[in-house]
Image (tube, coloured by chain):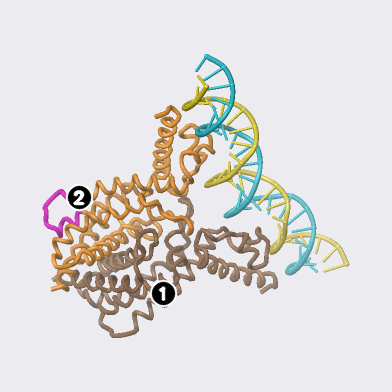
Chain colours: A orange, B brown, C cyan, D yellow
Amino acid sequence: MSKALERREKLRVDLILAAERMIAKRGLAGLKTRDLAREIGCANGAVYNLVADVDELILRAGSRTLRRLDEVLSAAEHAGEPSPQETLVRIAIAYCDFAAENLELWRALFEHRMEADKVLPDWSIDDQLQLFRHIYQPLAALFPKRSREELGITARSLFSAVHGMVALGLEQKLVAVPLPALRKEIAVLVRAMIDGLIARQS
Amino acid sequence: MSKALERREKLRVDLILAAERMIAKRGLAGLKTRDLAREIGCANGAVYNLVADVDELILRAGSRTLRRLDEVLSAAEHAGEPSPQETLVRIAIAYCDFAAENLELWRALFEHRMEADKVLPDWSIDDQLQLFRHIYQPLAALFPKRSREELGITARSLFSAVHGMVALGLEQKLVAVPLPALRKEIAVLVRAMIDGLIARQS
DNA sequence: CAGGAACCTTGAACATCGTTCAAGAAAAAC
DNA sequence: GTTTTTCTTGAACGATGTTCAAGGTTCCTG
């Protein structure tokens, strides 16, 4: 590979890492191209040689966040007792913990909105769909009679419900819930949802 | 009241209504002071005589949205069969419908973030806390042994879970869920949560 | 190795924001 | 009617994302 492209690639990686750090420290609204350029040592305009626009930059940083989240959920899936129910509880709490520890980066995943006419690139959509993967398998064990499609719906519902509790729980706008309390509430509700789903189907 | 103040008050109301319309049509990011000024017939700078900054404007529009939402939930609470369980389902679905019909205004409630050093005014916090009111009473009927505090926690958990399903369900970033399907999923999960919570406590 | 073509980088410039403010207009007070 | 206070205006300011022509750098070719 040519020397120029090498340098460009290194700069590109630097840029994305710098963007990630900046979002983590100052939130999505604190991401400024001029600051990024200064941080990686190039001109303001040069950012647009590395990346089409800030949207792409945010999506690339988001992709890294999603990958880290995926690892955390994967670890939660395969650690501890294998009971599907408790596995789902572990995954939910792992999601909560990840959001708390990576608050701004996690928020950026959902706060960011593209202009209506721009389309999400495929690699970004793929990243997001991976998340349901972890919760699909334990659910399949709990509901062996359900079709793949039904399980997908249940998985999305369950994930969304937990996401909502984390999102509103970590919001400081209202009364912020202490993290241990939130974890406990999540565990209670996940167990209740599973119990209820099992009871209703039989 | 003096004529000047009258005119000012009328302009203030116009401004907030115009902001509400603009958010509904173009989203929170499409709210521009210059457009608002043109719409209500005053200079750009005059907006700041009516309102401290756009943050306040967004909060005032949000307050109106919350009040309309409150009415919708209230109607759902007192209509139909009085079974607490089905009342909670009706409220959840009413929340979903309201979000779908007022998508951008509803999103603005949660997308908006103030700078860290500014504080939410009391009237805005009050508006938000009212929402839990509707779901508190049916829950109290279902769980007569729980303390006021425990019921508050359960209410927030339940509300948050439904909110998460609506939020991710209406998101277009991933696969958008058809509204009828979403309503059904919500009904299923709310019933399951309640069943599960009742089963676990006894 | 030389010279030209392709490409890259730069920083100034542009358009668009929210917000401020001095000056002029209008209203209120006396 | 004059003075004082208050309000309104629109130009100006500072940020910000993005573009672009000018100048450098790198790379290919003979």
Pointer 2 and pointer 1: residues touching (CB < 8 Å)?
A: no
Determine whether D21 is above or below B201 in the image. above
Instruction: Give the residues drawn in magenta, as a range.
Output: A74-90
Determine which quarter of the picture holds residue A169: bottom left
Determine whether B57 is above or below A27 in the image. below
Q: Quadrant of the C terminus of chain A?
A: bottom left
Disc 1 residue type (three-letter): Asp
Residue position for label 2? A76
Position of residue B73 measured from the top left corner of the image (x, y, whole percent): 38, 76
Q: Nearer the viewer, residue B176 or A180?
A: B176
Q: Quadrant of the N terminus of chain A?
A: top left
Residue position for label 1? B70
Q: Residues within 10 Å of mark 1 (few under 14, many from 20)?
A: many
- At mark 2, the secondary structure is helix
The residue sitting at 38% across, 67% down in the picture is B129
Position of residue B166 measured from the top left corner of the image (x, y, whole percent): 35, 67
- Residue B50 in the figure: left or right of residue B189: right
The residue sitting at 42% across, 38% down in the picture is A18
Task: Give the overall secondary structure of the magenta segment.
Answer: helix
